[in-house]
Amino acid sequence: MATTLTLNGEGVSFDVDPETPLLWVIRETAGLTGTKFGCGAGLCGACTVHVDGSPVRSCTIALGDVQGASITTVEGASGDLAEAVRKAWIALDVVQCGYCQSGQIMAAIALLEQTPHPTDADIDDAMSGNICRCGTYQRIRAAIHLTARTIEG
Ligand code: FES
Ligand code: FES
């Protein structure tokens, strides 16, 4: 039986094994390769997407578990907040190799939606599961603060 859901604002139906990890459906079936495979075990955050607005490790959730849900990937992240995050990332030259960054950005958007003016501790708490092998953590933190100031202004 096909699984129907909303992906980046469009209703879609996937006729694949409902046990398939959502990450692979996003990347292989839908062809949205902005969401990355890192560990495949929920440990690195590279695969973070939003499921009904909450950040989720798409490698650890099965397609069948998101029947009827609204999924947003980095390609579909839109609106003032998402744009402000993107601009802050560019302004502060956050990205090094880039591999972790779509997951970082999706986690940051989710944080700022819940906590518009996060403290350093809030940021560390929300982002600690998103690993960056290039060590861009300080720039990520600064970019989240910049986004908060931008949205406020
Ligand atoms: S690939 Fe999903 S958490 Fe690492
Ligand atoms: S920018 Fe390279 S892993 Fe984060």
Image (cartoon, grey):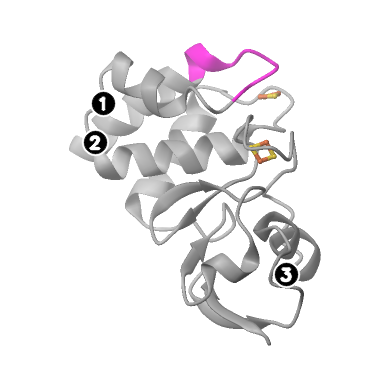
Residue appearing at x 46%, y 38% in the figure? 107
Q: Quadrant of the C terminus?
A: top left
Q: Which residues are magenta?
A: 131-139
Q: Quadrant of the N terminus?
A: bottom right
Quarter residue 130 falls in? top right
Asked which secondary structure carries label 3, the reply is: loop
Q: Which residue is mark 3?
A: 30
Residue appearing at x 53%, y 75% in the figure? 67
Alpha carbon distance from label 3 to label 1: 34 Å
Q: Are marks 2 and 1 in contact (CB under 8 Å)?
A: yes
Q: Which residue is mark 1?
A: 118
Q: Residue furthest bottom?
A: 1
User: Which amino acid is tagged 3?
Assistant: Ala
User: Which amino acid is tagged 1?
Assistant: Pro
Name the spot of residue 87 as percent of width and height, x first: 46, 38
Q: Is residue 44 magenta?
A: no
In primary-sequence order, the first of circles 2 and 3 is: 3
Name the spot of residue 110 as percent of width and height, x first: 38, 43
In primary-sequence order, the first of circles 3 and 1 is: 3
Alpha carbon distance from label 2 to label 3: 31 Å
Name the spot of residue 83 as percent of width and height, x first: 42, 48
Q: Which residue is mark 2?
A: 115
- Residue 49's place in the image compared with 129, above or below, is below
Alpha carbon distance from label 2 to label 1: 6 Å
